[in-house]
Image: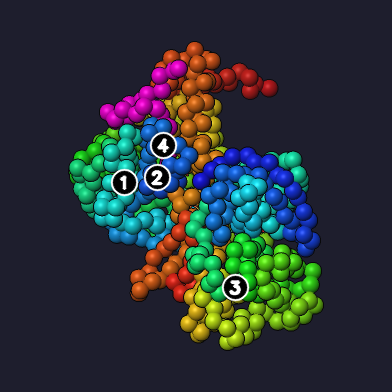
């Protein structure tokens, strides 16, 4: 049995597998398959100040090795989140992560304020949702946008702050550095990558929102590259996600520089996915003589350039 | 809810590109209610396929799935035969409200919307009327199965089988002729709207089974939204968890 525990921004996790926001409801939908306690943590559905209806359906489209979603942050709002959803899992032995999204830096700040004293261990600041008209990935795409949100959140937050980054940024490492210098306690990446599918018969997009965020195995290599770049640009911990579906994928994320992983779309294919991933990581560590999973973090090293080889 | 690999005990080609699978899944069968569904994992595809329970046989521990070959996933599933295994997640969702036996119910099914109604025919039998609509003779499925349990009228758009026309005139005639406690319907959206309008006109309760594209199937991703309105309050509900069956009067099409 390897030691799978990790610590992120001072918060101890019994294992490094976290259910990804938007894929695990408010924590109880998968209770028929495994107890919440089996996970290291849960990132709860993205929450906004007021209740939101989200986008008109269809919201789901299948893709090669993945899927698109255009849910558009449907959620009951922070009041209902605090009053109705959070209490249901407040006593459970799992790290609870609130995922927040706003239209303006002031809204993000108010959300962080409302979470003061609530039964959440970390706040994940979603500046990367590709499915909303205002805010969302627009903040995560530039250093100025990202900094403006993180600055406000840090003024109000009672819990450590994880900033969730978008692959839509031109240079994600630069965004990570900017939020680190603004006091972010960790970063998580990647959110979905904007995509599209078109129905051949109707010649209309499958999604009523036309575009939607890509998740699932198709994202894995992009996520690995970005986790690598970000983890080499900042000192704060990196939570890696995007297509993680097996223990091997999770180990790869660690080697790229992640301190924990989140699992989203894999749940839809296999509701046991997170628990299997934990078991497979454990087995992999055992057969490879790894005692502490945290020792794998950033353990891969790049090939050095070999200019001589190119000589013709 | 359960998720496992289960053995197929029978395959049947129903014609018109539709096939029937019986699956030995005692856990799912024991928990299943009419109107619920399963999500089938198809090798090589990232999303599961939602398919209604067309039969629930607690004695044999078997469910029946009737599937139309409509795309790559349902085509792959069409190659399964007796002895193969199938990956099921279920039973999922909230099924039909079930008044006590003796209630007079009407079933209105369109095409591949007919399968989820069959367990209701079996339950209500003599106090049940089924009205089944298809495009033409070649598309007719399950009419014999329904007729085994209850009074069954088949309608075809082109008149090549049964009564010519849509299900609406047949439903209206039934609503005029006898007291119906509840109407259950599943099929294409225009048919569902027509059923709702008729039932409102005759002040008869109706429940509709809806389709929406799904990911998780268990209520976790809110991918499968439907807008509902009840008592003047609009609410987005999940087809996979709060439905697929909804009160007709509440649905905002
Ligand atoms: C609650 C429910 C019950 C259903 N019951 C039955 C049934 O008993 N028998 C039957 O033949 N069909 C049923 N369907 C429709 C069935 O799910 C689709 O025909 C099937 O998913 C198509 O998959 P495909 O790979 O063949 O098609 P593709 O077009 O290749 O599928 C691509 C993606 O779109 C989704 N999709 C395509 N059409 C539909 C649709 N109409 N509804 C939902 N998702 C769709 C698929 O699941 C997949 O994710 C039901 C749908 C729902 C929501
Ligand atoms: C249906 C769906 C809803 C999502 N909702 C949110 C959300 O509310 N907030 C958020 O930060 N990320 C959201 N995401 C993104 C995921 O948390 C994750 O970053 C992404 O899906 C990549 O991981 P995966 O490939 O393991 O799914 C959502 C993803 C999906 C598929
Ligand atoms: S498909 Fe995920 S909530 Fe319905």
Which residues lie in the magenta part?
A: A1-22
Q: Nearer the viewer, mark 3 or mark 4?
A: 3
Q: Are the residues tagged 1 and 2 within 8 Å (C-beta)?
A: yes
Q: CA distance from mark 1 to mark 2?
A: 8 Å
Whether callout 1 and callout 2 share a subunit is answered yes
Going by the image, does A23 lie left or right of A246? left
The disc numbered 2 marks a residue on which chain?
Answer: A
- The residue under label 3 is B127
The x and y percentages for residue B111 are: 68, 68
- The residue under label 2 is A28
Most foreground residue, A125 or A305:
A125
Whether callout 3 and callout 1 share a subunit is answered no
Residue at 24% over, 38% down: A159
Report crowding for label 1: few under 14, some 14 to 19, many 20 or more residues within 10 A (C-alpha). Answer: few
When the figure is inspected, residue A205 is found, relative to residue A171, above or below; the finding is: below
Q: Nearer the viewer, mark 3 or mark 1?
A: 3
The x and y percentages for residue A219 are: 53, 40
Report crowding for label 3: few under 14, some 14 to 19, many 20 or more residues within 10 A (C-alpha). Answer: some
- The residue under label 1 is A88
């Amino acid at each position: 049995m390897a030691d799978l525990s990790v610590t992120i921004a001072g918060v101890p996790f019994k294992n490094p597998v976290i259910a990804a926001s938007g894929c695990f409801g408010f924590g109880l939908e998968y209770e028929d398959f495994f107890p919440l306690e089996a996970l290291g943590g849960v990132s709860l559905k993205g929450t906004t100040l007021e209740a939101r209806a989200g986008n008109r359906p269809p919201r789901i489209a299948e893709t090669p090795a993945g899927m698109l979603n255009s849910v558009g942050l449907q959620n009951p709002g922070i009041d209902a989140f605090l009053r109705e959803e959070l209490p249901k899992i407040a006593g459970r032995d799992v790290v609870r992560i609130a995922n927040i999204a706003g239209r303006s830096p002031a809204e993000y700040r108010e959300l962080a304020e409302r979470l003061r004293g609530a039964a959440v261990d970390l706040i994940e600041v979603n500046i990367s949702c590709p499915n909303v008209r205002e805010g969302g990935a627009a903040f995560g795409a530039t250093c100025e946008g990202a900094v403006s949100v993180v600055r406000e959140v840090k003024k109000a937050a009672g819990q450590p702050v994880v900033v969730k980054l978008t692959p839509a940024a031109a240079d994600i490492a630069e965004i990570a550095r900017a939020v680190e210098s603004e006091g972010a306690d960790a970063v998580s990446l990647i959110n979905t990558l904007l995509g599209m599918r078109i129905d051949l018969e109707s010649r209309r997009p499958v999604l009523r929102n036309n575009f939607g965020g890509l998740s699932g195995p198709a994202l894995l290599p992009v996520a690995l590259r970005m986790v690598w770049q970000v983890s080499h640009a900042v000192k704060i911990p990196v939570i890696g996600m995007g297509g993680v579906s097996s223990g091997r994928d999770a180990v790869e994320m660690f080697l790229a520089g992640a301190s924990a992983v989140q699992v989203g779309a894999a749940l839809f294919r296999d509701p046991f996915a997170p628990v299997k991933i934990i078991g497979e990581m454990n087995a992999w560590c055992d057969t490879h003589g790894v005692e502490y999973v945290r020792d794998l973090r950033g353990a891969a090293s790049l090939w050095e350039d070999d200019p001589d080889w190119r000589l013709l | 809810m359960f998720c496992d690999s289960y053995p197929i005990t029978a395959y049947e080609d129903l014609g018109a590109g539709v096939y029937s699978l019986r699956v030995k899944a005692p856990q799912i069968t024991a928990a299943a209610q009419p109107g619920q569904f399963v999500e089938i994992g198809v090798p090589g595809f990232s999303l599961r396929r939602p398919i209604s329970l067309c039969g629930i046989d607690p004695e044999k521990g078997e469910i029946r799935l009737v599937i139309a070959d409509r795309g790559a996933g349902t085509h792959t599933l069409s190659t399964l035969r007796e002895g193969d295994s199938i990956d099921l997640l279920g039973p999922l969702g909230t099924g039909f409200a079930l008044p006590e036996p003796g209630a007079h119910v009407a079933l209105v099914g369109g095409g591949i919307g007919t399968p989820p109604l069959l367990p209701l025919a079996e339950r209500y039998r003599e106090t049940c009327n089924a009205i089944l609509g298809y495009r033409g003779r070649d598309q007719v499925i399950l009419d014999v199965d329904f007729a085994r349990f209850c009074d069954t009228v088949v309608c075809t758009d082109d008149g090549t089988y049964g009564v010519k026309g849509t299900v609406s005139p047949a439903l209206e005639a039934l609503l005029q002729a006898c007291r119906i406690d509840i109407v259950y319907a599943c099929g294409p959206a225009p048919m569902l709207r027509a059923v709702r309008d008729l039932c409102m006109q005759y002040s008869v309760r109706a429940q509709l089974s809806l389709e929406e594209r799904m990911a998780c199937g268990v209520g976790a991703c809110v991918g499968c939204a439907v807008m509902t309105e009840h008592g003047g309050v609009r609410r987005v509900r999940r087809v996979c968890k709060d439905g697929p069956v909804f009160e007709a009067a509440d649905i905002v099409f």
